[in-house]
Image (tube, rainbow, N blue to C red):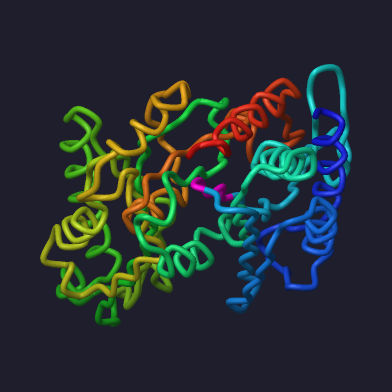
């Protein structure tokens, strides 16, 4: 199985699917390769959907599977600091190196090896927009499903092959504050200055987040950028604040968004744009009971909740039992010289193959 996994991984890593810029179309070489493998494996029905702007969903089914496996094919940008060629698979000792080997083309290669070397029923959903924090592909797919379509959905993000049933939600929000420009000698600058308004909101937001952080498993909050105005002698007519928050499992990301955006009177002078609103896992109002029962029934080790967000929460919001389970460690993802243990790839394949027999 290892030889088959590495053969597929070598090709997948060579295919440039960096996002951004997400220049991925239905005719991309990565889909041509997957087509060739699954057609050779036999028995698959293939369906590819183009949602526009590089958002491509590739859905392949064989037989009557009870488990859906989801893998995103896009990667973060290569970046700098590599000591190896990033778009070439390199094997050194017990590790495989290359952009995407951990996040998460290694999981894709393991599933393709199962398709090639067994006749098990399989449902494979490949997507191309996870790294853009957009969720277009999975939102479209989950919206077309019903809660009883599958016993479980496996989202193959790196968890060291432990089943993760809970993770934080993620908010990314841009605020644009509006002031009344004028000469800084005017006393009204104290209240009409957009930067002053932004700072008052920021102070309130940090205090709110600090209070929440004192609770068990409270939110994580971060102001990433802040700026505006045109000069020290001009009352600032504009200010921009870009912030994020991570909401613990069981929390409500939309309620948190509302609370943080309305902390001060200055909120009335700001236009908030929630660029991304990803629910925690399980999604608000749902339970991990069915996912937990699935893992226990199949003797899958259940790990702790994690702090990073995955698209499993989108499936969960649609009522589908959702599990995050894949090879590698999140610490290896997005890094220079990204790597994964070969043993992890083999373990993932063994677990996926076992779960494909779920009846």
State the residue in front, 146 or 26.
146
In this rendered view, identify the residue nearer to me: 221 or 29.
29
Residue 68 lies left or right of residue 209; in this view the side is right
Expressed as whole percent of the image width and height from the top left, the position of residue 87 reads 84, 47
Residue at 55% x, 53% y is: 64
User: Quarter-wise, where is residue 103 in the image?
Assistant: top right
Residue at the spot 50% in from the left edge and 64% down from the top edge: 134
Residue 146, quarter of picture: bottom left
Q: Is residue 69 magenta?
A: yes
- Where does the image place residue 184, in percent across and percent down from the top left? 28, 73
For the point 56% across and 50% down, which residue is it?
70
- 80 is within the stretch colored magenta: no
Read off the magenta span: 66-70
Is 133 positioned to the left or the right of 280 in the image?
right
Instruction: From the top left corner, tell me how far across and down residue 187 is, in percent.
Output: 15, 73
Image coordinates of residue 188 in percent, x first then y, are 15, 75
Magenta-colored segment: predominant secondary structure? strand
The tally of labels here is: 0
Residue in front for this viewpoint, 317 or 40: 40
- Reply above or below: 150 against 94: below
Q: Is residue 314 left or right of residue 136?
A: left
Q: In which quarter of the image is the N terminus?
A: top right
Q: Which residue lies furthest to the left in this view?
A: 265
Establish if 186 lies above or below 208.
below
From what the image shows, is residue 292 above or below residue 207? above
Q: Residue at horizontal 72%, vertical 39%?
A: 114
């Amino acid at each position: 199985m290892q030889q088959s996994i590495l053969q597929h991984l070598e090709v997948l890593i060579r295919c440039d699917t960096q996002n951004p810029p997400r220049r991925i179309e239905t005719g991309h070489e990565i889909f041509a390769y997957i087509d060739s493998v699954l057609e050779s494996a036999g028995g698959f029905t293939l369906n590819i959907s183009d949602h526009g702007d590089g958002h491509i969903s590739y859905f392949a089914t064989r037989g009557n599977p009870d488990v859906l496996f989801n893998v995103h094919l896009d990667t973060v940008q290569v970046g700098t600091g590599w000591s190896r060629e990033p778009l070439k698979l390199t094997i050194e000792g017990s590790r495989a190196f290359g952009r995407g080997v951990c996040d998460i083309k290694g999981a894709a290669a393991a599933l393709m090896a199962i398709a090639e070397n067994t006749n098990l029923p399989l449902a494979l959903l490949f997507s191309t927009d996870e790294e853009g924090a957009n969720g277009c592909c999975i939102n479209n797919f989950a919206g077309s499903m019903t809660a009883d379509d599958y016993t479980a959905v496996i989202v193959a993000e790196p968890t060291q092959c432990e089943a993760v049933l809970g993770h934080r939600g993620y908010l990314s929000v841009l605020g644009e504050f509006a002031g009344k420009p004028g000469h800084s000698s005017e006393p009204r600058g104290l209240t009409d200055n957009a930067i002053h308004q932004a700072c008052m909101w920021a102070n309130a937001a940090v205090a709110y987040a600090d209070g929440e952080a004192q609770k068990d498993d409270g939110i994580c909050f971060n102001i990433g950028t802040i700026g505006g105005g045109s000069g020290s002698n001009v009352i600032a007519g504009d200010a921009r604040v870009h912030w994020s928050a991570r909401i613990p499992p069981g929390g409500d990301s939309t309620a948190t968004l509302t609370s943080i955006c309305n902390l001060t009177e200055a909120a009335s002078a700001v236009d908030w744009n929630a660029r991304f609103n990803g629910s925690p896992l399980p999604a608000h109002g749902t339970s991990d009971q069915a996912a937990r029962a699935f893992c226990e029934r199949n003797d899958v080790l259940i790990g702790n909740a994690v702090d990073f967000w995955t698209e499993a929460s989108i499936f969960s919001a649609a009522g589908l039992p959702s599990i995050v389970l894949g090879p590698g460690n999140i610490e290896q993802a997005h890094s220079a010289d990204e790597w994964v243990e070969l043993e992890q790839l083999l373990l993932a394949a063994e677990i996926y193959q076992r779960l494909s027999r779920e009846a």
